[in-house]
Amino acid sequence: MQKYIDAHCHISDSTCLTEVGAIFNAAKPSDWATVSKISDKEKNIYGAIGVHPWYISDLSVGWQSELSDLLKQNPELMVGEIGLDKFHNDMSRQMDVFIAQLNIACALNRGVCVHCVGAYDKLQHIMKGTGSVLPRFLLLHGYSGGTQDIKKMAEKYNVYFSYGARNLRNANRILATPLDRILAETDDDTPTEIINVVNRIAGILNIAPDKMADIIYKNTIRMLNS
């Protein structure tokens, strides 16, 4: 049977875990324990915990220590979903929270799942400022940036680019992404929908669906093991 992994999805009360693999992201501290527990218990389920830029106003004192401690207790967890969003308030605060989480990821040698909307210039500026200290990998979920920086980011910061149904309207990004850096996502709570996303990416690249599924699965596993 063909293997699939949804590179970016979320847990909800209606989530049904299936034989399709998935990377579940926690967007706020109240999600961390659930994602940690499910990723530890379920085969082929991976977890990422962090604070999404939409939820930074709700943070309590000591959140960084809580995040760091939980990551130390769960060595397989990634850091995510974290990031920057031009269309939400207080970019300065967003950057502070993002950098704090990026530093934790670097210190613990974890991969990072990133939400970035309209702020790729700021993201690259921050990454450049980290110098030689980098997280294990960056997963740019729902990539919506320019095509001119894709190869540079992939090579310089070990970036993988994940595409979902909303991103497939712009085929140029997928066509510009190195084949070994393409991932697929639902950004939803139904991972099985990843099969449709993979098939649509296959159509854009004119690759047989089963071959595309194999490429994306291997890309995802390589990223997780990097």
Image (cartoon, helix red, strand yellow):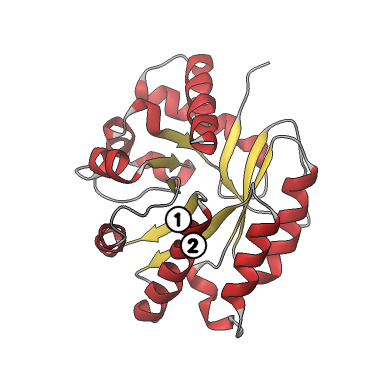
Q: How crowded is mark 2: few (under 14 residues within 10 Å), some or many (20 or more)?
A: many
Instruction: Judge by depth and name the residue closer to the eye, 120 or 172.
Output: 120
Q: Whole-percent x and y of residue 182?
A: 41, 33
Q: Which residue appears at 36% of the width and 23% of the height?
A: 205
**Is residue 225 shown left or right of residue 42?**
left
Q: Tell me if residue 194 comes above or below residue 80 in the rendering.
A: above
Identify residue for label 2: 82
In this rendered view, identify the residue nearer to me: 207 or 97: 97
Rendered residue at 45%/73% (across/down): 97
At label 1, the amino acid type is Val
Classify 66 as above or below 198. Answer: below
- Image location (x, y in percent) of residue 54: 50, 72
Residue ID for mark 1 = 114
**Amino acid tagged 2:** Ile
Q: Do the residues labelled 2 and 1 touch (CB within 8 Å)?
A: yes
Q: How many marks?
A: 2
Location of the N terminus by quadrant is: top right
**SS of the residue at dot 2?**
strand
Residue 223 visible in the current orientation:
yes
Q: Which residue lies furthest to the left in this view?
A: 148
Q: Looking at this view, is 57 or 221 the one in front?
A: 221
Pointer 2 or 1: first along the chain: 2
Q: Is mark 1 on a helix, strand or loop?
A: strand
Q: Can residue 28 be seen in this view?
A: no
